[in-house]
């Protein structure tokens, strides 16, 4: 029964990251329709937060939906840190990095966050032990991710500012993984996720003081725009952040975060399906390396 539950945790982690990988397609289509990346982030988090408020008020009491504050101001500060590192800061760093660096550089740096998570876990959590097979699995997955992203063209155009911003996004997600490990021991997934959306939205508001641009209502009422925003807000944000918080509590920060390496795979698969982009041999080789790395870091750890 324990093995079946563990398998379910891995499946949920894989599906969650697969859905996140597909969000790049919806985001790209929304940008072409006239929405900015900042507007897309704000709208998807707003949809998710409002839905969680409704579910919290009218759903089962065990969800903790009627609870407003954490047990202490220290925990509330941690919730704000989650909203920043997993929401506003991660988004802003990643998208601003794309303005100064190449998509390849940004993808490589941001998707390397499991390596940084592994290092930070070892530094800040004395009870975290990293076996040689787990480290080897993480390295295999990283190499596979690099093969997928580079696609046979090892040309890195270094851009100090852009690459630094991408590194900040990577570190933001690594910090998110560390803090969520602590909060999972004290609060349920629903309460944590709702806080992430709230503080993600709250800390995003100062951005609009410098870039006061808002979408027109006519654009937001178009059926295809509504469909993509609902997909991003309901499934990719509300549901996936809930499942990711739950999986982090079950698998641990390191094993769960390793699934981030799957992100480029699902993005390319959905791009080939929806946008008719080409899948190469490098993609297949990289995918096999990523899956081998996940197997090593997960299977050996269970022993």
Image: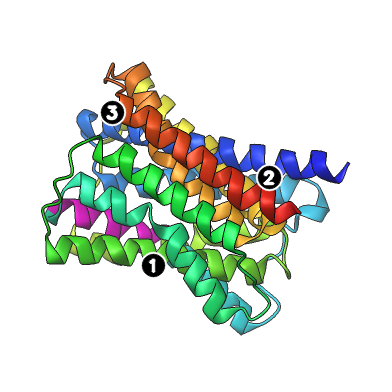
**Residue 54, position as x, y percentages in the image:** 64, 45
Residue at 73 percent across and 69 percent down: it is: 185
**Magenta segment main secondary structure:** helix
Q: Is residue 269 left or right of residue 253?
A: left
Q: Viewer-nearest of labels 2 and 1?
A: 1
Mark 3 lies on a secondary structure that is: helix
Badge 3 or badge 1: first in the primary sequence: 3
Residue 133: image quadrant is bottom right
Residue at 20 percent across and 33 percent down: it is: 34
**Residue 275, position as x, y percentages in the image:** 29, 19
Tell me how far mark 2 sits from mark 1, CA to CA.
Answer: 32 Å
Q: Nearer the viewer, residue 184 or 120?
A: 120
Res 222 visible: no
Q: Within 10 Å of the Cα at label 2, are there few (<14), some (14-19), or many (20+) other Cα atoms?
A: some
Tell me how far mark 3 sits from mark 1, CA to CA.
Answer: 28 Å
Give the label on residue 55, or none. Answer: 2
Q: Is residue 48 above or below residue 195?
A: above
Residue at 82 percent across and 54 percent down: it is: 62
* Count of all numbered marks drawn on residues in the image: 3
Q: Viewer-nearest of labels 2 and 3?
A: 3
Q: Which residues are magenta?
A: 87-99
Q: Residue furthest right?
A: 1
Query: Which residue is under mark 3?
Result: 29
Badge 2 or badge 1: first in the primary sequence: 2
Q: Is residue 119 above or below residue 27?
A: below
Residue 171: image quadrant is bottom left
**Residue 182, position as x, y percentages in the image:** 65, 72
Res 264 visible: yes
Give the label on residue 171, or none. Answer: 1
Does the magenta segment cover residue 236?
Answer: no
Q: Quadrant of the N terminus?
A: top right
């Amino acid at each position: 029964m324990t093995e079946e539950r563990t398998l379910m945790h891995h499946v949920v982690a894989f599906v969650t990251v697969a859905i996140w990988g597909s969000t790049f397609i919806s985001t790209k289509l929304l940008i072409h329709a006239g929405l900015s990346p900042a507007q897309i982030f704000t709208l998807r988090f707003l949809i998710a937060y409002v839905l969680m408020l409704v579910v919290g008020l009218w759903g089962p009491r065990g969800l903790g939906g009627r609870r407003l504050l954490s047990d202490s101001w220290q925990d509330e500060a941690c919730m704000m840190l989650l909203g920043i590192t997993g929401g506003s800061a991660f988004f802003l760093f990643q998208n601003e990095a794309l303005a100064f660096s190449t998509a390849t550089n940004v993808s490589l740096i941001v998707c390397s966050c499991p390596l940084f998570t592994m290092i930070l876990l070892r530094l800040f959590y004395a009870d975290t032990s990293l076996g040689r097979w787990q480290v080897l699995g993480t390295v295999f997955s990283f190499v596979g991710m690099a093969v997928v992203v580079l696609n046979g063209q090892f040309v890195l155009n270094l851009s100090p500012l852009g690459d630094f911003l991408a590194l900040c996004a990577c570190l933001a997600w690594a910090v998110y993984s560390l803090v969520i490990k602590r909060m999972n021991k004290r609060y349920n997934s629903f309460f944590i996720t709702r806080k992430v959306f709230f503080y993600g939205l709250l800390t995003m508001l100062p951005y609009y003081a410098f870039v006061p641009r808002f979408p027109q209502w006519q654009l937001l009422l178009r059926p295809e725009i509504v469909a993509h925003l609902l997909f991003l807000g309901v499934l990719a944000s509300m549901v996936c952040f809930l499942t990711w918080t739950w999986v982090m509590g079950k698998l641990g920060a390191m094993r769960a975060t390793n699934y981030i390496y799957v992100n480029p795979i699902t993005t390319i698969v959905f791009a080939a399906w929806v946008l008719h982009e080409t899948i190469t041999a490098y993609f297949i080789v990289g995918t096999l390396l990523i899956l081998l790395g996940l197997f090593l870091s997960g299977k050996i750890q269970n022993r």
